[in-house]
Amino acid sequence: MSMRFVNILFYGNFSSKVKEINIQGVTLVINPEKLLELVLRYAVKAEGGEVYRRYRRFRADRWYGGIATADVVGCNLRCGMCWAWRNTSYLLDAGEWLSPGEVAERLRDIAKRRGFQQVRISGGEPLIAPAHLLKVMDLLSGYIFIVETNGTLIDRQIAKELAARPNAVVRISLKGATAEEFEKITGSPGAYFYRQLNALRLLVESGMKPCHDVYPAAMLGFSTDENIKKLEKALAEIDPDLPQCIDVEYVILYPHVVKLMKTRGLTPIRAVRPDGVPAFMI
């Protein structure tokens, strides 16, 4: 079975062009830096002093007890259990170009109509264009802004920018419990897992309070008990409170996610049906 993966790129001598491929049973190494370059080229633009990004939809959602959500196009990872791969995360040239002001207006409208106190950008990686994200956050300073990020793009400067915004709550979405699990899930080098951990460290060092302003989420759907203990130890070395506030994620078996995992050769240890998501994951 072949399947179209938009903009999957590899280390080594593989072509960097978009191609239709069958990756079942084939070991691939996906290059996040090349993916970042493509998203910046095709899904981010500067115009009239503003940074624009492509968006697919805006919606009210049940997560976090209720949140206004904007689904942005483009990500620098290719997770093998990603729920958004068809519509946003794996794409480049889909969606509508929107300025930070337009994004903020639409999120505010949903939040007002639904009585939400929280807003977010989801579906892709918001920190691919930090200037865009930070301006949206500033325009929505009256709301809690949950920054859902894989953390691989957070450096000390971005950490300081996020920490300077009182409405920011940063959720670092760890792709597995170890570097080896990260490679299995994303197809990218395990060194990027340590970037995720370092993002947590930088945010804490920048003044964000662990388990209040910043916390780890962890995809543990492919994790052994032993590796979960390793993760808890690694988080405790950053701050002793972090292991206590891991936002646990299991694979949600949406049909399109099952299809993707089959193509990527992934079999989860822990998974839930869409109609059986436990309360702790909502």
Image (cartoon, rainbow, N blue to C red):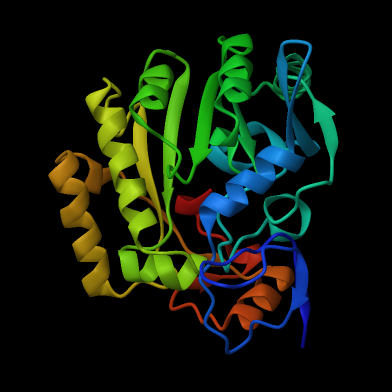
**Above or below 125: residue 1:** below
Q: Nearer the viewer, residue 124 or 111?
A: 124
Image quadrant of residue 56? top right
Q: Residue furthest toward the front?
A: 13
Left or right: 79, with 105 as reference point: left
**Residue at the spot 43% in from the left edge and 32% down from the top edge:** 170
- The picture places residue 88, in percent across and down from the top left corner, at 73, 49
Q: Is residue 94 above or below residue 251?
A: above
Quarter of the figure with residue 2: bottom right
Residue located 26% across and 29% down the image: 204
Q: Residue at x 24, y 42 (%)?
A: 242
Q: Position of residue 99 (x, y in %)?
A: 76, 20
Q: Could you tell whether 220 is left or right of 209 in the image?
A: right
Residue located 27% across and 25% down the image: 209
Q: Residue 172: horizontal and vertical position, in percent?
A: 41, 42
Seen from the viewer's position, the closer of residues 248 and 138 is 138
Q: Quadrant of the N terminus?
A: bottom right
Q: Nearer the viewer, residue 155 or 120?
A: 155
Q: Is 88 in front, or is 111?
A: 88
Percent x, y for residue 107? 72, 23
Can residue 210 be seen by looking at this rendering? no
Quadrant of the rendered image containing residue 96: top right
273 left or right of 22 in image: left
Q: Is residue 272 visible?
A: yes
> Taking 260 as reference, is 200 left or right?
left
Total marks shown come to 0
Q: Is residue 110 above or below residue 50?
A: below
